[in-house]
Image (spheres, helix red, strand yellow):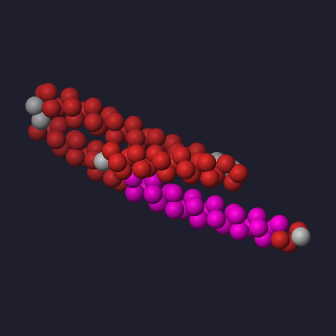
Amino acid sequence: AKADIKEAGQEFSAKVKEDRDELKKDIDDAIGKLDRKIEEADAKMDKATDKEKAKWKERKKELNAEKEELQASWKKAENETADKWDEFKANTKEKIAKVKADL
């Protein structure tokens, strides 16, 4: 029975590691997209009228906030315990979906 419990624990740990690796890739992809949108906003601000600049400045602020939220989520992931992993993963995937929908 001890061997079965140990094996189940190892399988769970491997699954959490696999999930973390996948989530890190998803976060990195979303951050990359946000970075490109931030660069686009900067470029548009360079050519925009004062009224348009205010709009693009606000958009850039929103994009940076989303990026910081994803970065904070990953830092939190590094400290999440296995028993809270599924909840954390679901919440982070929801944030990533929100970012993708916003882009």
Q: Residue at x 40, y 57 (%)?
A: 29
Count of number-bearing discs: 0
Q: Residue at x 27, y 36 (%)?
A: 59
Residue 35 in sight here: no
Q: Quadrant of residue 7?
A: bottom right
- Prevailing secondary structure class for the magenta stretch in the rendered image: helix
Side of 73 where 102 appears, left or right: left
Position of 8 relative to 71 (above/below): below
User: How far from the left and from the top, in percent, is residue 90?
Assistant: 55, 50
User: How far from the left and from the top, in percent, is residue 33?
Assistant: 33, 53
Residue 96 in sight here: yes
Position of 44 relative to 14 (above/below): above
Q: Residue at x 85, y 72 (%)?
A: 3
Side of 6 where 94 appears, left or right: left
Say which quadrant the N terminus sits in: bottom right
Side of 51 where 65 appears, left or right: right
> Was residue 44 drawn as part of the magenta stretch in this picture?
no
Magenta stretch bounds: 5-31
User: How far from the left and from the top, in percent, is residue 16?
Assistant: 64, 60
User: How far from the left and from the top, in percent, is residue 84?
Assistant: 67, 48
